[in-house]
Amino acid sequence: MSEKTELIQELEALQKKAELELKEIQDAVSLQNWRAAYLSRSSDVMAFFKRLPEAPKEERPKIGQFANQVKTALEKQFEKKEIMIKQAYLDANLKNERLDVTLPGRKPARGRLHIQTLVLREIYRIFAEMGFQVYRSPDVESDENNFELLNIPAHHPARDLWDTFYTTKPGVIMRTHTSPGQVRAMREFSPEPIRVVLPGMCYRYEQIDASHEIQFNQVELLAVGKNITFGDMKGTLEEFTKRMYGEGVRTRMRPSYFPFVEPGAEMDVECFVCAGKGCSVCGGKGWLEILGCGMVHPTVLRNGGYDPEIYSGFAAGLGPERISMLRYRIDDIRNFWGNDVRFLEQF
């Protein structure tokens, strides 16, 4: 018996053994074990290729060809068996795991309005009931509109109150407040009396903490007409807080300085986050400022096209994020723009 015949006989015997074992397999795990035993790189079939040098040189091609035929035949049988097992598994699932059509379907996830959109709409609604209309102004402003026409000329010390983002184009900045919209609105409606709210995003290069951000919404309030007094402003703002927070809300108004109003003030609301005891939101004071306000400065009235001898007016800059923090007892202003779905889906 030649060496060639012995190798071929061994291959035939191995193929027959593999085929018999394959017929008995009924599950995927056993099938993969069979594949590792007969078709992997370390299998008995592949070992015959390493034994080719044992055969005479002239017989090696024939033995190698036969070994390839055995390998190919086993691979085809493996693929066929794999399809059969998968189909059998699917059939069993369809038979035993029937679909319960009485179960309710899963509702698709739906988008929702951002909390600041909701609060801004509530602010618009409250002031609309008082006769104010929404007026839009641009985020990118000129230095003239943002400062000079608001009684803050170049090199004025008050400019240090706003940490400004300057662009590469001289005289063009990201607005630090919505107050530039005052002059835009007055110039458009002058000499008629006006009552407008000017919402929008503002930008300041300042330290971020629980109650400060580098970008934030602001809603400017402006009323210009004849015989408008500080008492009108105070009554309007107090009525706003009652409609926003309820009749029992506690507020206080403190004198403050803004170059574009005279006199100026700030309004605080009792901190609902800590119930007035003091926390990181209110800085331990028990009160949180929600707006700055005052009577429109005569210079600003004049720049807007109104004669300050005849007309007067009041303005206020509301902070919607802080208003939201008090209304919903949110302890960190950074949550609004952190895009954490867990936070946003609460509203």
Image (cartoon, grey):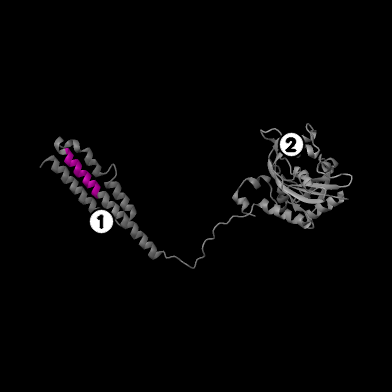
Q: Overall secondary structure of the magenta stretch?
A: helix
The circle drawn on residue 321 is none
In the visual, does 306 lie left or right of 22?
right
> Who's the residue at 60% across and 51% down the image?
342
Q: Quadrant of residue 132?
A: bottom right
Quadrant assignment for the C terminus: bottom right
Residue 177 vs 82, above or below: the answer is: above
Q: Which residues are magenta?
A: 60-73
- From the image, tell me which residue sits under label 1: 23
Q: Is residue 59 magenta?
A: no
Q: Would residue 93 be seen by someone viewing this image from the given angle?
A: yes
Please name whichever residue, 259 or 265, is drawn nearer the observer in this view of the structure. Answer: 259
Q: Position of residue 72 (x, y in %)?
A: 24, 47
- From the image, tell me which residue sits under label 2: 143
Label tally: 2
In the visual, does 231 lie left or right of 344?
right
> Who's the residue at 17% across and 41% down the image?
63
Badge 1 marks a residue whose secondary structure is helix
Badge 2 marks a residue whose secondary structure is helix
> Disc 1 vs disc 2: which is toward the camera?
2
Q: Position of residue 244 (x, y in %)?
A: 75, 55
> Who's the residue at 20% across and 51% down the image?
16
Residue 213 vs 225, above or below: the answer is: above
In the visual, does 250 lie left or right of 62?
right
| Mark closer to the chain start, 1 or 2 | 1
Kindly give the residue lying farthest to the bottom in the view shown: 102
The amino acid beneath tag 2 is Asp
> Who's the residue at 23% across and 38% down the image?
50
The amino acid beneath tag 1 is Lys
Q: Position of residue 273 (x, y in %)?
A: 72, 50
Q: Would residue 56 be seen by someone viewing this image from the given angle?
A: no
Quadrant assignment for the N terminus: top left
